[in-house]
Image: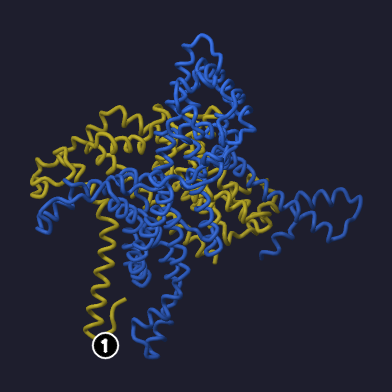
Chain colours: A yellow, B blue
Amino acid sequence: MSLPTYCTPLERIAHLSYRLFCYGVLFFLVMPILIIIPLSFNAEPYFSFSEGMLNLDSSAFSLRWYQDMVNNSQWINALKNSLIIAIASTFLATSLGTLAALGLARNDMPLRNLVMALLISPMIVPVIIAAAGMYFFYTKLGMGQTYTGVILAHTVLGVPFVVITVTSTLVGFDHSLTRAAANLGASPSRTFFKITMPLIRPGVISGGLFSFGTSFDEVVVVLFISGVEQRTVPRQMWSGIREQISPTILAVATLLIVLSILLLVTLELLRRRNARMRGIRE
Amino acid sequence: MKPQESVAPSTFFTMQKVLSRKKNPGLKEKLRRAERWNRIKAFLLVVPLLVFVGISFIGPITEMLHRSVYDPLVADNLPKTITALQNWDRQALPEEAAYRALVTELLSLQKQRILPKVAGRLNTEQSGMRSLMTKSARKLSRLSVIDNAKESLIAIDQRWQQIGYWSAIANLDSRYTLSHYLAAVDMRYDEQGDITAQPEQRQIYKSLFIKTLGISLAITLLCLLLGYPLAYMLATLPDKQSNLLMIMVLLPFWTSLLVRTTSWIVLLQTEGVINDVLMALGVIDERIQMIHNLFGTLIAMTHILLPFMILPLYSVMKGISPTYMRAARSLGANPVYAFIKIYMPQTLPGVGAGAILTFILSIGFYITPALVGGRSGQMVSNFIAYHMQTSLNWGLAAAIGGILLAAVLLLYYVYNRLVGINSLKMG
């Protein structure tokens, strides 16, 4: 990327402005997220920096919005709901998705493209359409305003991520290993848990994390099919933004940012581990 | 290695063959059976998920599509009136029989308390129908004897001698109707039962679809404009540096949609950070409205979708060998010419993938336009939600959804042909 020494001044200026543009775009990407964090410690109920904050006056900062969040039963309840729904749907999506990915990765799988397109479709179809349809369909089945309904909906939205990540981990999977295990007398389930699973675990975990993140962030379906009892954190944020916007939302947002950083770091570590394991085999 | 996989018979199958030894099928036959069994096994692994997706996703979508054409409310509740109108020529007023049937059915609907629903449905076809029907039913129930249904109805309201109000009933004579789809493209059945355009002042959906396409296109272009140079820089920097910068792309990708929308509200609102900064710098004298309008939708959605453009571009650019550019330069091309002639064509698959992905995602966006779009920044999805939750015109919501779905599936098909879903990667 560094310019050769024979560059003309014009080229240097062009290069410099190009670099500046790129850093500008990066700034545009990150600044809106990072700005939330200091603002959530604002002592005043405003969404902008007060004089005191800019002068780093310690009295201008406070934890009052965090206290507000912890003391608010609605937020705590929403967090509980979000966790229940996200964990249940992640478990379902990961087990069903991994099983399907194992089938899809075999090259004798019939109708593979059609099946794949069908399984990926929840990711492509606008979620508002799915939510509207689920509203009609789940009510008909008596699953409107139930945890079961929300969990099923979130599972199906998370499934494509599991299928995609696990299938891509299985590309180049050495099937002679499972055959060797079978040859040595291992039952299919033993082969799966002792041989296959450890090898594809990074993919399974990242698929699971993706589906957890999807569920934890999902609001449209929840808006349509959940009742008051199934209020999740995003649902609570949604009404917070629409109705009485209070800086408590910034405290919640900050916690969600921390959560996404954790997810990001975990995924990056998994990706590296996966790459390393493949590097050994290649 | 791959062909062997399908040849290898399952252990179980071979064992059985060895043990039985009754007949000795040819090698070809054995191979065929083994392959078939393998195919079945592969399929069995997928079946649970297929069933699950069928019930919890394809079922709802089918139900929605069904709702967009199935509308039995009028046909089921005014059956006698509809039968009486069967041979009506729509030129003169209907016969006494039709009036009589309507009178009986209006009264019984009112008794069953479903008149508001039926009248409401008819009102979406012919405005004024709701008040006309409830008023007529109310007044009819006060009459003790009705000798001449036609005269009584017209005495209650003059509108019963206008053909339009009768056509509204006749147009919904079947449980299946295209009227929702027609409404979704600003058309309707007229008095004669023919399809015509809605009156000018009632046309909103065609321009809504065009606006949504326009917004999505603008966002896609903005993402390409911002994302292409950045992806190029990330792809050409040394790995250590680019990995560090890549985190700045992945962080927003992973951050909750609502968090990002909230931050744009915080930044853009009139008392918000950006207005503060602009005021302090003296760029503006008066605070400007940057949110709850089209500008808010554009900027927030560009921010949200930008990673979806950068990631496919990056992965394509990473695979382009720098030697081509060097060769072009050494043959005398200036950097701009070499870039346009040699580098850009090689990045086209990435551009296509990123652009279609961004476009597909933005065309169905709901949350962000709903929160920061105001009136001018609303898109198709927001109208689906409006008809689902506020106006309760579910048939119309389903029909708009059906059109949006068709558009997205078409784009998905193109994406699949161009890029292949198998190459879709996350993060």
Image point (27%, 58%), residue name: A28
Left/right placement of residue B340 relative to residue B164 reads left
Q: Residue furthest bottom?
A: B331
User: Who is closer to the viewer here, B371 or B375?
Assistant: B375
Name the kind of residue labelled 1 in the image. Answer: Tyr
Give coordinates of residue B172: x percent, y percent. 56, 34
Q: Tell me which chain the residue with mark 1 is part of.
A: A
Q: Crowding at label 1, few (<14), some or many (≥20) Cα neighbours within 10 Å? A: few
User: Who is closer to the viewer here, B181 or A91?
Assistant: B181
In the depicted structure, whether residue B88 falls above or below residue A99: above
The quadrant of the rendering that contains the C terminus of chain A is bottom right
In the depicted structure, whether residue A119 falls above or below residue B332: above
User: Who is closer to the viewer here, B24 or B131?
Assistant: B131
Residue under label 1: A6
Give coordinates of residue A169: x percent, y percent. 53, 57
Give coordinates of residue A2: x percent, y percent. 29, 77
Give coordinates of residue B397: x percent, y percent. 47, 40
Q: Quadrant of residue A227?
A: top left
